[in-house]
Image (cartoon, grey):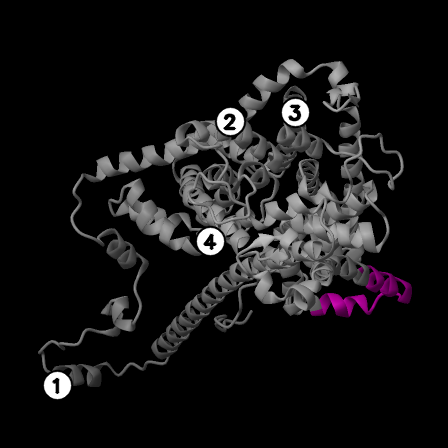
């Protein structure tokens, strides 16, 4: 056996670090695919192109939304004129189509909602990630997830019946206006911002917190001086996405703002927004009036796409900074390794000339060298700052504390706890309000009966069937496309501009306001394709809305399957599709099912998408081309017009029960999957 040194041997990569669709692994897979039989090669390539086509559905959907909305809005440029369109007067009966006051209303309610919702959401996220015990964290996080699943029409119903009278009695007005919308929208955006902020906080290494604690920092000091600044990019992204949710909200705003297309005198005066005006006017508009409504849809689409672009740009800069930092660390480690090798080589090549060396040492002056050796220099002398020094500097930043550290820590922890408990209390309040008022109206006759007369006396059975019918049809359309698209992104796609573009399209699709999706569905499926107001038109529009939800959760589920399972199958001679179909998808099925169930819950509670694609006829649909009335539209008509409040309460309770059941079932599947895989 040779005694030569083995310094040049490289450490083999960990199996979980190997991506089969990146770099050399991709080239190896492609090369091996060329060695199989011709029929297998054709089959694998055909499947790959099929998956790519499914992934491009998201891109096609975004392009179609933009094309059809701008096509229907084209008279804005030719007949109305941009100057009139961006004017300050909205009066279609007088030929005035200015949307400035509507845009100002959207901006006003969005800013106010962010001012209330952002502190509450960030405080709740900090509590869940930094303070709460495991049991309490489970309770509050469940409340946050359930808040995210409650339909917007329920929030609007709660604001109309509970918040509006309170504000009316306090202000002396009607209670419609920006203040009511602020409170409703703030509750609605809390789950979105909380969830994304939690992801940002959890991405901060635990060692940073431990280093701060070891230097005497309290929990509050570690949070606001170390953790929050480190996660600021992710928090900003969460706020931007929450802002997009607030700008695009339709039904809840429609029910509480008062719908007056003027600049409000105060925060308790009625106003209107872009989304609420579209939903209010679309049913009876025609000609230039309808074109102006589609023009508002174009404006909303551009705003949502721009917000997604900002988030992706900021995230890309963050990832680029991480990559540069990692490259510098690797370069530094490589230099240190080379220096170590050179030192070992120098020691190995030394001769036994001790006497001359001693003589030279005696000739050297005994005065100490004022310049310390390189090894003794602090990292700051090399242009960097150690983590310990940075944490110490951050902790010591600012003047002397006016209160003790323990007092400020207790106050901060109490504030975060109150914020988290307030979020849970909001869920309990909404569910309690619906349950107390709706439970006395529930009966078999109400569930299985038919609405009768102008006051909608009787039951709501046709609306339940319509809701389940259109949701099942949308799921059958969406699920295969979304799953196969996720398979392409996770297993087949070479990471690059194409994949980045597809993901940007999927993110944009998920952020498109629901009323814009409804306009698109009306323009494409109802009018252009001639499906009319039907189950099929509504199901296609809902399927496009559900697509990014199922895509994202499926891709994450596939990537969570350990890589060594794939390589074991490849080692046994399995092809790519055999590995995906027989190993990866079955392993990821519980998490995929979770995403599908969440998407179903979203579809059941959707209102604006089906408002002008399904119709409002109270009948029992049989064919996909039949019309119908879903539960959300039925609730909106009952509550907003005050036709039959008892039936409205009963419908709201059944709707909440259905949504909560879907969300709790999704959490059960997720937890069961995590426990089986050894997760938490």
What residue is disc 4 on? 234
Q: Earlier in the sequence, mark 1 or mark 4?
A: 4
The answer to whether any part of residue 490 appears in the image is: no
Q: Earlier in the sequence, mark 4 or mark 2?
A: 2
> Which region shows up in magenta?
27-47
Badge 4 element: helix
Residue 652: x, y in percent? Answer: 64, 26
Cα distance in 3D space between marks 3 and 1:
101 Å
What residue is disc 2 on? 162
Badge 2 element: helix
Position of 616 compared to 420: left or right?
right
Q: Nearer the viewer, residue 625 or 14?
A: 625
What residue is disc 1 on? 363
Residue 404: image quadrant is top left
Residues at marks 2 and 3 touching, judged by CB atoms closer than 8 Å:
no
Q: In the image, which disc is placed on residue 225?
A: none
**Front label number (4 vs 2):** 2
Residues at marks 1 and 2 touching, judged by CB atoms closer than 8 Å:
no
Cα distance in 3D space between marks 4 and 2:
34 Å
Position of 651 compared to 113: left or right?
right
Residue 450: x, y in percent? Answer: 80, 22
| Extreme residue toward the front, this view | 94
- By secondary structure, the bulk of the magenta-drawn segment is best described as helix
Of the 4 image quadrants, the one containing the C terminus is: top right
Tell me which residue sits at (44%, 31%) in the image.
167
Residue 28: image quadrant is bottom right
Residue 405: x, y in percent? Answer: 22, 40
Residue 199: x, y in percent? Answer: 49, 47
What residue is disc 3 on? 648
């Amino acid at each position: 056996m040779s005694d030569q040194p083995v310094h040049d041997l490289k450490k083999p990569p960990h199996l979980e670090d190997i991506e089969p669709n990146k770099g050399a692994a991709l080239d190896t897979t492609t090369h091996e695919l060329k060695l199989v039989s011709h029929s297998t090669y054709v089959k694998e390539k055909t499947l790959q192109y099929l998956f790519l086509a499914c992934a491009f559905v998201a891109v096609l959907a975004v392009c179609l939304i933009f094309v059809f909305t701008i096509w229907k809005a084209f008279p804005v440029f030719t007949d109305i004129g941009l100057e009139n369109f961006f004017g300050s007067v909205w009066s279609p009966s007088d030929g005035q189509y200015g949307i400035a006051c509507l845009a100002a209303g959207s901006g006003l309610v969005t800013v106010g909602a962010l001012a209330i919702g952002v502190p509450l959401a960030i405080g709740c996220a900090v509590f869940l990630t930094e303070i709460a015990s495991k049991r309490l964290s489970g309770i509050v996080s469940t409340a946050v997830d359930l808040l995210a699943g409650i339909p917007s029409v329920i929030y609007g119903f709660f604001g109309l019946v509970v918040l509006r009278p309170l504000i009316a009695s306090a202000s002396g007005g009607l209670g419609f206006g920006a203040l009511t919308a602020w409170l409703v929208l703030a509750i609605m955006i809390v789950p979105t911002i909380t969830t994304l902020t939690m992801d940002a906080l959890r991405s901060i290494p635990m060692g940073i917190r431990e280093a701060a604690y070891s230097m005497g920092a309290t929990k509050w000091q570690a949070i606001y001086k170390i953790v929050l600044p480190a996660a600021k990019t992710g928090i900003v992204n969460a706020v931007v996405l929450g802002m997009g949710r607030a700008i695009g909200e339709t039904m809840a705003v429609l029910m509480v703002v008062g719908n007056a297309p003027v600049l409000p005198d105060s925060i308790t005066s009625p106003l209107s927004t872009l989304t609420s005006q579209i939903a209010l006017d679309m049913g009876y508009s025609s000609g230039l009036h309808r074109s102006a409504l589609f023009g508002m849809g174009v404006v909303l689409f551009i705003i949502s796409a721009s917000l997604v672009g900002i988030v992706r740009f900021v995230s890309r800069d963050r990832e680029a900074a991480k990559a540069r930092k990692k490259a510098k660390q690797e370069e530094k480690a490589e230099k240190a390794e080379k220096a170590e090798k050179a030192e070992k080589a120098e020691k190995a090549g030394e001769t036994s000339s001790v006497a001359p060396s001693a003589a030279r040492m005696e000739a050297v002056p005994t005065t100490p060298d004022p310049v310390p050796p390189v090894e003794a220099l602090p990292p700051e002398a090399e242009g960097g700052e150690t983590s310990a020094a940075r944490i110490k500097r951050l902790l010591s930043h600012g003047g002397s504390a006016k209160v003790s550290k323990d007092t400020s820590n207790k106050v901060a922890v109490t504030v975060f706890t109150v914020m988290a408990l307030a979020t849970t209390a909001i869920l309990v309040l909404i569910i309690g309000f619906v349950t107390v008022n709706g439970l006395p109206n529930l009966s078999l006759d109400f569930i299985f009966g038919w609405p009768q007369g102008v006051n909608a006396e009787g039951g709501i059975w046709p609306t339940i069937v319509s809701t389940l019918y259109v949701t099942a049809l949308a799921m059958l359309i969406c699920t295969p496309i979304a799953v196969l698209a996720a398979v392409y992104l996770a297993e087949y796609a070479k990471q690059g501009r194409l994949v980045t573009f597809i993901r940007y399209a999927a993110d944009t699709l998920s952020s498109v306001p629901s009323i814009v999706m409804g306009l698109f569905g009306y323009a494409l499926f109802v009018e252009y394709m001639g499906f009319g107001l039907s189950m099929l038109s509504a199901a296609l529009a809902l399927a496009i809305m559900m697509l990014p939800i199922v895509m994202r959760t499926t891709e994450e589920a596939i990537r969570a399957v350990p890589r060594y399972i794939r390589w074991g199958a490849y080692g046994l001679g399995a092809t790519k599709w055999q590995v995906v179909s027989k190993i990866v998808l079955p392993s990821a099925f519980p998490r995929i099912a979770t995403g599908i169930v969440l998407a179903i819950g979203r579809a059941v509670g959707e209102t604006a998408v089906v408002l002008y694609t399904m119709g409002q006829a109270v009948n029992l649909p049989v064919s996909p081309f039949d019309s119908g009335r879903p539960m959300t539209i039925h609730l909106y008509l009952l509550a907003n017009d005050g036709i039959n409040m008892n039936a409205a309460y009963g419908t709201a309770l059944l709707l909440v029960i259905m949504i909560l059941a879907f969300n709790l079932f999704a959490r059960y599947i997720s937890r069961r999957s995590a426990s089986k895989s050894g997760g938490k």
